[in-house]
Amino acid sequence: MNYVVYILYSERLGRYYVGHTSNITDRLQRHNTGRSTYTSKGMPWSLVKEFLCADRGQAVRLEKEIKGRGIKRYIEDNNIGM
């Protein structure tokens, strides 16, 4: 099963969020309808980037790498535009 690591941005908060999922459409909808309590205050969230991964293990490792580097710094270091 393919997984996606995704980076979201909230203009309201001026913050990024990173996560992983097997269904990006459903997950983005959950973030933008308040069904994800951690991100509910930042609605609406915009999808900045998604990375396809072969399996959940790879997705978890990439998500940890992005969080460890800092999402904003990871975006800048990898020339990911908004």
Image (cartoon, rainbow, N blue to C red):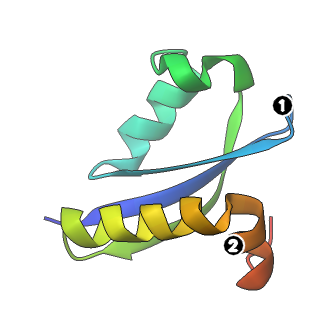
Q: CA distance from mark 2 to mark 1?
A: 19 Å
Q: Residues within 10 Å of mark 2 (few under 14, many from 20)?
A: some
| Number of numbered tags placed on the structure image | 2
In this rendering, the answer to whether 33 lies above or below 52 is above
Kind of residue at disc 1? Leu
**Residue 3 - label:** none
Quarter of the picture holding the C terminus? bottom right
Kindly identify the amino acid type of the residue bearing the numbered disc 2: Tyr
Q: Quadrant of residue 35?
A: top left
What crowding class fits label 1: few (fewer than 14 Cα within 10 Å), some (14-19), or many (20 or more)? few
| Extreme residue in the left direction | 1
Q: Is residue 79 visible?
A: no
Q: Can residue 45 be spotted in the picture?
A: yes
Report x, y in % for residue 66: 56, 66
Tell me where residue 74 appears, x and y as whole percent: 69, 72
Q: Where, by quadrant of the figure, is residue 46 drawn?
A: top right
Q: Is residue 31 above or below residue 40?
A: below
In the picture, the quarter occupied by the N terminus is bottom left
The residue sitting at 72% across, 26% down in the picture is 42
Residue drawn at the location 21% of the way across and 62% of the way down: 56
Q: Is residue 25 above or below residue 75?
A: above
Furthest toward the bottom, the residue is 78
Name above or below for residue 39 compared with residue 66: above
Residue in view at x 78 percent, y 42 percent:
15
Residue bearing mark 2: 74
Provide the secondary structure element on which disc 2 rests.
helix
The answer to whether 15 appears left or right of 23 in the picture is right
Quickly name the residue at label 1.
13
The reply to whether the C-beta atoms of the residues labelled 2 and 1 are less than 8 Å apart is: no
Query: Does label 2 or label 1 sit earlier along the sequence?
Result: 1
In terms of secondary structure, where does tag 1 sit?
loop
